[in-house]
Amino acid sequence: FKITFDAGDTLAIDAVTAEDNVTFGKAVSTDVILSDGSDTAVVLWDSSEGELVFADAAELVIGAGQDLVITSDGTLVNMTMPATTSGVVLVPYAAATVAALHIDGATNDWDGADNVGMLHLSNNAALIHAGSSLLYVDSSAAPINSAAATCATFADTGTNVVTDPAYAVAIESTANHGLNIVTAAGTDIANLVLSGAAAQTGALIEVVGDTGAGWDGQSGMGCVYISHKSALAHALASALLIDIGTGTAIDAALGYALRIDDDSVVAAANNSYAAVIDSVANHGLQIITQSTTKAGLTMTGKANATVSNVVIDGSSGPFIGAEDVGMLHLTNATTELAHVDASLLRVESSMRPKASAMGYLARFEGEGTARAGAAAVAITAKDSTEVGLNITAGQFVVAGTSTMTGAVTCAAGVQSAAVARAATLAGDGTGVIGDGESWITATASDADAIITLPTPTPGNIVYIFTDATGCELRSSAPATVAINGGAAASAEAALGASTLNRAFCTSATTW
């Protein structure tokens, strides 16, 4: 049917007196006014402005099983709200199990565009409250046990993009931190938990610093930065804990708890390090191995390497040491070694050394200023029942002068090396017997040629065997060091041909 009214006419439909009035043409630019007869409970439809106006609080009720469909070619809903009142409040039914707000992009195959979301929150003005944000999810209810999420869930079941990875959630910030997760103090729950899929081979968390121009960092900053300023309250607490659990590592696993892989190129002159532990007041590193058959630390050098596997740098500090403290300190004070061949330090090599190699297993070299009485290596056994040094095979060579302050027992005798000396007319050059030389084979082209004794050291004994020519014997200082009581500028003693002569040094001035 059709009802036509002139301007100013009124059609009143009363189910009950003074209620449910429908008025047409009541005011200019107003097409429909729904009123209960008061000035507040009014609903206006203004076609000229395209507005449906509720003058007071109102409810839009849709019947059971019905849908409210809004179809538009432009902006669907535009709401302008007061400063202190919510624009839209959705109140689900009690015990509801469906979404209070469902944005369906699948029905019409929503494509989106760059920097556009199905739900788009935009704000260009600065937020003036510390706790304000464009999206705020507040949940104070107690979750069920093992709840997957209590405030927000992002479920991405799309196809994985391998060559150019896509992300389910991206946070892009120009000048601020990207994400801040704050958990109530005193709780034993984690701020962030990353759970991998079964048989997953990709990283649970990946920090990429090489995209774009590349992350440069600054002094005291890392691509992953873990900061903690207060004292840890538990002995086993740490800023970073990697717990593998009780799983079994594969054979020859290389870093199943932690691996630092450095493929960067560094100039040979640079002293750069892949990992640094910088501790001001505490020990730098402790490795505790629970296994009785596994090494606490293994250093593997590169093939054909010409640098040390381990360098302990005491010059940068520098290290000055303390009583009974070494730069490398091996200690075992409470446990008796259970095997005869066990030791605190073992150097083992099956390689073939170069000829005349000087210390291919161990080498101690002092290059500092010499100090009288200082020992480069000191071995202190518990008492006289222990052996300080045991050489089970090979030769024992001492190039310098040796001093034995204790008794010396030789089971197979002491063999002095034979040294050849050629007498000279001046007793110099090849005719001089060196300090510490004991058995001399002397040759001479003239019976007047001279062999010179070493610097006198009381107790020293020198054996001299001459050839068929014989020679003369002088001290290192004939005028002051006497031979058989005679001291003069040219004092000497004749050594007969093919004779064995023995010279005893009885004092600093006599042979």
Image (cartoon, helix red, strand yellow):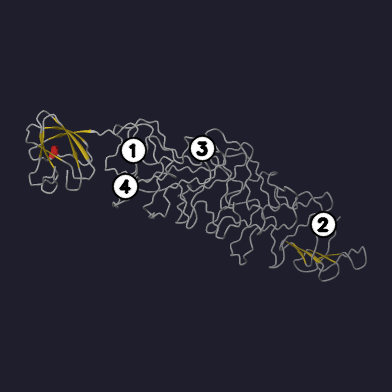
Q: Nearer the viewer, residue 422 or 268?
A: 422
Give left or right: position of 503 versus 318: left
Position of residue 175 relative to residue 276, above or below, is below
Q: Nearer the viewer, residue 280 or 362?
A: 362
Q: Position of residue 174 (x, y in %)?
A: 53, 57
- The residues tagged by marks 2 and 3 sit, at their Cα atoms, a distance apart of 66 Å
For the residues bearing labels 3 and 4, Cβ distance under 8 angstroms: no
- The secondary element bearing badge 2 is classed as loop
Question: Which quadrant is the C terminus positioned in?
Answer: top left
Give left or right: position of 300 versus 74: left
- The residues tagged by marks 2 and 4 sit, at their Cα atoms, a distance apart of 96 Å
- The residues tagged by marks 3 and 4 sit, at their Cα atoms, a distance apart of 38 Å
Q: Which residue is mark 1?
A: 359
Question: Which one is closest to the eye, mark 3 or mark 1?
Answer: 1
Question: Which quadrant is the N terminus positioned in?
Answer: bottom right
Give the residue drawn at x 31%, y 35%: 357
Question: Which one is closest to the eye, mark 3 or mark 4?
Answer: 4
Question: Which one is closest to the eye, mark 2 or mark 3?
Answer: 3
Q: Which residue is mark 4?
A: 366
Say which label, 1 or 4, has the lower sequence index: 1
Question: Which one is closest to the eye, mark 1 or mark 2?
Answer: 1
- The secondary element bearing badge 3 is classed as loop
Q: Which residue is mark 3?
A: 254
Q: Which residue is mark 2?
A: 61
Q: Amino acid at mark 2?
A: Val
Say which label, 3 or 4, has the lower sequence index: 3
- The residues tagged by marks 1 and 2 sit, at their Cα atoms, a distance apart of 96 Å
Say which label, 3 or 1, has the lower sequence index: 3
Q: Amino acid at mark 4?
A: Gly
Give left or right: position of 486 versus 209: left
Give residue 399's quadrant in the image: top left
Q: Amino acid at mark 1?
A: Gly
